[in-house]
């Protein structure tokens, strides 16, 4: 059923999942696409179209069963499985991820931390000891690793990524400041650039400031004419 679903639709799924989770917490059992659209600020037709990609889930005149839809989207996103994550680079960002307990509630469990800094060896971060990078191979041989998060500097990212791929790790969550592209097309990469998002915010701040200045100038102009 999930064939040929566009990445644009997949990108919207986590947001549906999050909103539906909130509705469940509020005790809401069913919701129409119109109500959901108001809540999420997307059109009802977009919601219907998106969810139709997966077989709909809705019933005419009844709306969506929140629990069912939540579980189905979770299943589509693969959240019913546990995912073991290792973190490479236990600096500020790596430690923040390791300490962030909410991932575990979604089944993303951090099971290994690796760094090259000997000062960090054995330090416990989020219940896990930091191991030296040279222990990566033996660790991967004895532990199932589903995802590797890269939070070390960009200049080593390519090399490490290839090392991980050779160990059979098929998913990379890349925070290093580089757009990782791997030759092995069976390996999936999610590049997360927090600074890109911050730069977009900066641009939008500037734009809204300009708009406000323009509005202000316009108001002044009209009041001085009166
Ligand atoms: P952050 O960027 O997370 O704030 P930082 O500024 O302390 O951390 P970075 O230089 O970005 O330092 O490195 C992040 C972490 O990655 C450090 O703990 C560093 O020791 C580690 N690191 C550097 N190179 C590698 C590597 N090749 N493999 C694993 N870890 C590495």
Image: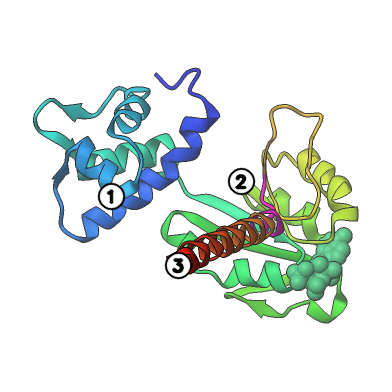
Give the percent coordinates (x, y) of residue 6: 51, 25
Query: For the magenta stretch, what is the residue range?
Result: 191-197
> Does residue 63 lie above or below 79 as drawn?
above
Q: Which residue is mark 2?
A: 146
Residues under labels 3 and 1: Cα distance? 38 Å
Residues under labels 2 and 3: Cα distance? 64 Å
Q: Which residue is mark 1?
A: 39
Q: Residues within 10 Å of mark 1 (few under 14, many from 20)?
A: few
Indicate which label's residue lies in the foreground, 1 or 2. Answer: 1
Give the percent coordinates (x, y) of residue 111: 60, 61
Q: Which residue is mark 3?
A: 223
- In which image quadrant can residue 135 be found? bottom right
Query: Is residue 52 within the magenta segment?
Result: no
Name the residue nearer the viewer: 223 or 188.
223
- In which image quadrant can residue 68 be found? top left
Whether residue 224 appears in this view of the structure is: yes
> Does residue 114 lie above or below 83 as drawn?
below
Whether residue 133 appears in this view of the structure is: no
Indicate which label's residue lies in the foreground, 2 or 3. Answer: 3
Mark 3 element type: helix
The structure residue drawn at horizontal position 54% and vertical position 69%, both measured from the top left corner, is 100
Give the percent coordinates (x, y) of residue 98: 61, 68
Mark 2 element type: loop
Name the residue nearer the viewer: 70 or 122.
70
- In which image quadrant can residue 211 be found? bottom right
Give the percent coordinates (x, y) of residue 33: 23, 36
Q: Is residue 59 left or right of residue 12?
A: left
């Amino acid at each position: 059923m999930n064939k040929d679903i566009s990445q644009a639709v997949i990108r919207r799924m986590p947001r549906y999942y999050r909103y539906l989770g909130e509705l469940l917490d509020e005790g809401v059992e069913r919701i129409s696409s119109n109500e959901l659209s108001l809540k999420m600020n997307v059109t009802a037709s977009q919601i219907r179209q998106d969810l139709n990609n997966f077989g709909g889930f809705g019933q005419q005149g009844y709306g969506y069963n929140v629990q069912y839809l939540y579980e189905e989207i979770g299943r589509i996103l693969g959240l019913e499985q546990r995912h073991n994550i290792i973190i490479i680079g236990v600096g500020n960002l790596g430690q923040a991820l390791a300490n962030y307990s909410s991932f575990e509630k979604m089944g993303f469990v951090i099971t290994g931390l690796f760094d090259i800094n000997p000062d960090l060896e054995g330090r416990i971060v989020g219940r896990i000891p930091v191991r030296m990078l040279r222990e990566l191979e033996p660790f991967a041989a004895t532990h199932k690793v589903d995802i590797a998060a890269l939070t070390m500097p960009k200049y080593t990212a390519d090399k490490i990524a290839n090392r991980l791929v050779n160990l059979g790790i098929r998913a990379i969550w890349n925070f290093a400041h580089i757009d990782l592209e791997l030759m092995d097309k069976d390996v999936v990469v999610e590049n997360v650039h927090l600074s890109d998002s911050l730069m977009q915010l900066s641009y939008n701040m500037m734009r809204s400031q300009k708009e406000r200045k323009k509005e202000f100038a316009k108001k002044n102009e009209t009041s001085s004419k009166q």
